[in-house]
Image (cartoon, grey):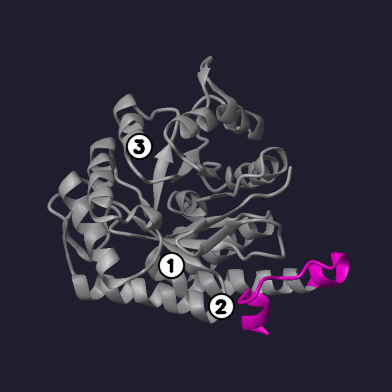
Amino acid sequence: MESKVYNINGLKIGGERGVNPTVLVGTIFYAGHKIVEDNKKGIFDKTKAEDLINKQSEMADTTGNPCMVDLVGDTPEAMVKYVKFLTDVSDSTFLLDGVDGAARIEGLKYIDEVGLQDRCVYSTISMTTKDDEINALKKSKVNSAILFAFSTYDPTPEGKLGLLEEIDGKKGLIELGDESGIVNSIVDTAVLDISSLSLSCKTIQMVKEKYGFPSGCAPANGMSLWKKAQLDKGYYKSCEASAAVFTASYGADFILYGPISSCTTVFPSVATYEALHAYASKWDSGKQAVEGHPLFKMF
């Protein structure tokens, strides 16, 4: 299957390895984020938040890996405040990643009201997504979303792939996305712990081969549970960057790498790998990296 390439707010995601760079996604306002003063009301340190967002954009410009911001809102009130803030201080594409359906639905309403739909990727449509969210998506103008291939009973690549087609004898994630008006379907292959990252990366390859959808995952989900990596901050940062590079090596089109503050280590690590891989691909198969790729930024 030919790899699909989407253009979302000027950001390209998908395609062949060695041609388009991996999109790196940093998370902000997550549970325990120190810049958040009240997660229910969405009160936070705006100066620090803007600095973090700008630093990720700076790293994207420096390395050639595009970026998105993963906005996590605990409540409808907080979600709307976060979306308004981000879109006031940055032109970044963002994931609408509320903690529950109510937060995401309220975020969708605000996005439609102010015309931000082209900058938003809905996160996520999964086997647990309820009808009220699907209906909200149908009414919304947002047409990009992540299909979350997470299964509690079959974490194998085959099990994850099966969710795209069918969920308990009912509609699969692809059909749910289509019915919700999603044009740009992006698949997250669901990381449970650090060891499952290998299975999720294998699934990335299978999704791209069978469906052509841009695909990736969140190694950060496994990192947060990995006791070995908790020895000290420097040790953790090295493991975090290595996990992101490993994910990129499987052709991931996007990587949710964790806290946005980690951009200073993750971006250079992934970009170095991608520059080397693109150079090798050019010699091996004649593939030419796009303008602005890490190949042209890192060497």
Query: Label for residue 273?
Result: none
Q: Residues within 10 Å of mark 2 (few under 14, many from 20)?
A: many
Task: List the residue tagged with mark 3.
Answer: 137
At x 35%, y 52%, the residue is 117
Quarter occupied by the N terminus: top right
Q: Is residue 248 above or below residue 50?
A: above
Nearer to the camera, 212 or 140:
140
Task: List the residue tagged with mark 2.
Answer: 63
Query: Reading the chain from its start, which is encountered first: label 2 or label 3?
Result: 2
Name the residue type under label 3: Leu
Query: Label for residue 232?
Result: 1
Badges 1 and 3: C-beta atoms under 8 Å apart? no
Q: Which residues are magenta?
A: 280-299
At x 22%, y 60%, the residue is 84
Q: Is residue 234 left or right of residue 109?
A: right
Badges 2 and 1: C-beta atoms under 8 Å apart? no
Q: Is residue 215 left or right of residue 118?
A: right
Name the residue type under label 2: Thr
Name the residue type under label 1: Asp
Query: Reading the chain from its start, which is encountered first: label 2 or label 1?
Result: 2
Percent of width and height locating residue 177: 47, 34
